[in-house]
Image (tube, coloured by chain):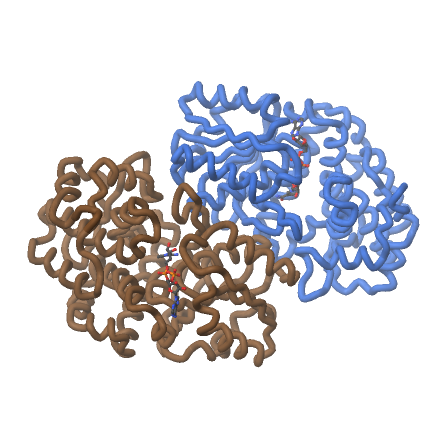
Chain colours: A brown, B blue
Amino acid sequence: MQTLDLALPDTRYPIHIGRDLLKRVDLILPHLPVPQVAIVTNTTVAPLYLATLQNALENAGIACIPVILPDGEEHKTWVSLNRIFDALLEARAERKITLIALGGGVIGDMTGFAAACYQRGANFIQIPTTLLAQVDSSVGGKTAINHPLGKNMIGAFYQPRMVLADLSLLETLPDREISAGLAEVIKYALLGDDAFFAWLEEHIDALRGREHDALLYAVRRSIEMKAEIVAEDEREQGRRALLNLGHTFGHAIEAGLGFGAWLHGEAVAAGMVLAAELSREYGWLSQQDCNRIGYLIENAGLPVHAPDLGVANWKSLMSHDKKVEQGAIRFVLLERLGRAVLKGDVDDRTLDRVLTGDRVRPCAG
Amino acid sequence: MQTLDLALPDTRYPIHIGRDLLKRVDLILPHLPVPQVAIVTNTTVAPLYLATLQNALENAGIACIPVILPDGEEHKTWVSLNRIFDALLEARAERKITLIALGGGVIGDMTGFAAACYQRGANFIQIPTTLLAQVDSSVGGKTAINHPLGKNMIGAFYQPRMVLADLSLLETLPDREISAGLAEVIKYALLGDDAFFAWLEEHIDALRGREHDALLYAVRRSIEMKAEIVAEDEREQGRRALLNLGHTFGHAIEAGLGFGAWLHGEAVAAGMVLAAELSREYGWLSQQDCNRIGYLIENAGLPVHAPDLGVANWKSLMSHDKKVEQGAIRFVLLERLGRAVLKGDVDDRTLDRVLTGDRVRPCAG
Ligand SMILES: NC(=O)c1ccc[n+]([C@@H]2O[C@H](COP(=O)([O-])OP(=O)(O)OC[C@H]3O[C@@H](n4cnc5c(N)ncnc54)[C@H](O)[C@@H]3O)[C@@H](O)[C@H]2O)c1
Ligand SMILES: NC(=O)c1ccc[n+]([C@@H]2O[C@H](COP(=O)([O-])OP(=O)(O)OC[C@H]3O[C@@H](n4cnc5c(N)ncnc54)[C@H](O)[C@@H]3O)[C@@H](O)[C@H]2O)c1
């Protein structure tokens, strides 16, 4: 097991990474202000892992309220959130109860938001069960639910007390979800560490094969980079926005195709390719860099070609984003491999070229 | 106009108190990061004051989205909250929009919570229009909505950027609401300032008659005391709990009679009388002190006799409260007039005596 420490102005918390951590209640107990938890999970994860966690906690004298929600991004809504509140209030749970998120990013985001709101702030622990949740969503304190008019529009910044990234849980994860998680891993390399990028080029097959040592390194390095950026800029006033590399294009893909058609990581992957193309237009990346990025993404089992949404549609979808300020879309681009920058004044003609170039393919394809 | 300053560890904000402040956009403009606001109000307040505020803002070049919610505590729910989010997202409002609460505590609590959650934190200004909201709910950053299983159970700590307490708005407020607001004013005197208590004994008629100078002093002194306590203990880890004087009994009255039967301030008033009785049981207050408290509350137009909910029912209702920790009810009692203390170990027999004493009357009465 390895432990990272995320230090923020108001709080700090440990992130444990390793195998067979689900039974390690000794890691959990010090973070429970009262001996009561609610384990929030979903119908897919519960049959796999709920009993292990619940038994371990109950054997240690902790009262557990299991809350099993339906699986899927389409359930990341107020309705599910209210099911958490119902369960807590029916059990007359105190303000100091700990909510444990046992699931992927959907469960983590909802549980964190529920913890932020329950009696104006309950205790919160993340046990991420997808690769994406381990390297990204469980760290940094962004929580949210969706609104019919926009993804993640309703939420809070709310930090967990602890994150337990158990790599063993990834064994049951579908291949497509592993690839989606790798998109975010590649993102970290692209935006801040070219040596990590080269390491990924070497180890991408080992990662897809879930080899423990490769996973441990990739997850640790990813969390380390996220933790460092979040520590500098918890509320996304500045540098944290770099974590959105590929996301402005990616969100447009998700929204344009209808959420659920592509996984978030898949959309981000194709979005990073477009961001790389746009960076090449500015003369920052070489064609060779773009090729390396494309190969790695492809070798991770991810799409390199964005669907053709139509230029006007792309722009309208991208302008409806939390990253927009006073009407201007701010793109995260690459100054070079391993170094991202924010760019607010991308001119229309350059953008059009990228959105109609050969990295974009007719939707039916 | 007088201005108080609430200084918290992470932020500070001004609270302006005076008359005819609704048109004073010069006070509002410095607090708008972008020239767009949503004015959240209700069907009672909108016809009285919305046009004045909206015209003043629009004349200053600020785009306004009015959101008019149904009036009443029963609408302090997720449904109303979602109407705010719908309006914001339909207008594609940016994260930096300012939500202005124009109304009593219900509107203030909901608008503040909406601001806390919209894109994980929009800007927020309070324009409280009831006495209770001016002296209490608009200051200190507690926001919430109700859940069918409990009042204010879902919410956030979220501070406004500014509070505008316009005493002129109180002219249209029903007498019963003025009295309900006075309950909280009396609370401040009881818990921390016996000279203010004596001043209130002198000026209670002037306050009920809405005389400007009396209101200005009472509102300022109340906000000053609340601001001081909140500055010390924003998250209610300690001293802020003293602000709940009368509230443990009061919430039980509200819940026991069904919310809406008594106004919050009325329930708090009768609750403070019980808290005084309980303090007398401990020998802290004299019978004469209790009489003074009873008279002042009565002269404020407030009930001094709690309804008889039945001892077992009282206790069950009181134990279902955010102030409960590990099963123990913590009461706020009076060591003397002007000095409140937290007491966690109130013994059953003493409590029973108070709950069956002559300050409690059959419900039908
Ligand atoms: N908060 C943040 O900073 C942040 C960052 C990135 C993404 N997100 C959010 O995360 C969500 C996506 O997260 P995700 O990719 O984890 O999706 P997810 O939570 O939907 O999980 C993907 C699928 O894998 C299943 N699953 C989870 N763990 C499993 C396991 N161990 N074995 C087998 N199946 C398992 C889930 O039930 C689901 O069907 C989105 O809602 C996105 O908005 C949040
Ligand atoms: N956040 C806090 O710290 C805090 C503290 C105390 C109470 N509260 C909350 O505040 C709420 C009670 O607030 P309230 O007493 O202001 O009730 P309220 O908001 O329901 O207002 C009372 C009534 O007066 C009407 N009204 C408001 N302003 C008016 C005006 N100027 N002229 C005429 N009518 C007017 C309202 O429409 C309503 O019908 C409760 O929900 C309570 O939980 C919050």
In the image, B160 versus B227, the foreground residue is: B160
Quick check: B265 left or right of A114?
right
Location of residue B345 (image quadrant): bottom right
Location of residue B214 (image quadrant): top right
Residue B165 vertical position relative to residue A134 in the rendered view, above or below = above
Tell me if I can see residue A9 in this picture.
no
Quadrant where the N terminus of chain B is found in the figure: top right
Furthest-right residue in this view: B358
Quick check: A341 left or right of A163?
left
Give the quarter the ligand 1 occupies.
Answer: bottom left
* Picture coordinates of residue B199, whole percent (x, y): 78, 35
In the image, B287 versus A185, the foreground residue is: A185
Circle count: 0
Residue B132 vertical position relative to residue B152 in the rendered view, above or below = above
Residue A261 vertical position relative to residue A349 in the rendered view, above or below = below
What residue sits 79% from the left and 31% below the top? B204
What residue sits 39% from the left and 71% below the top? A165
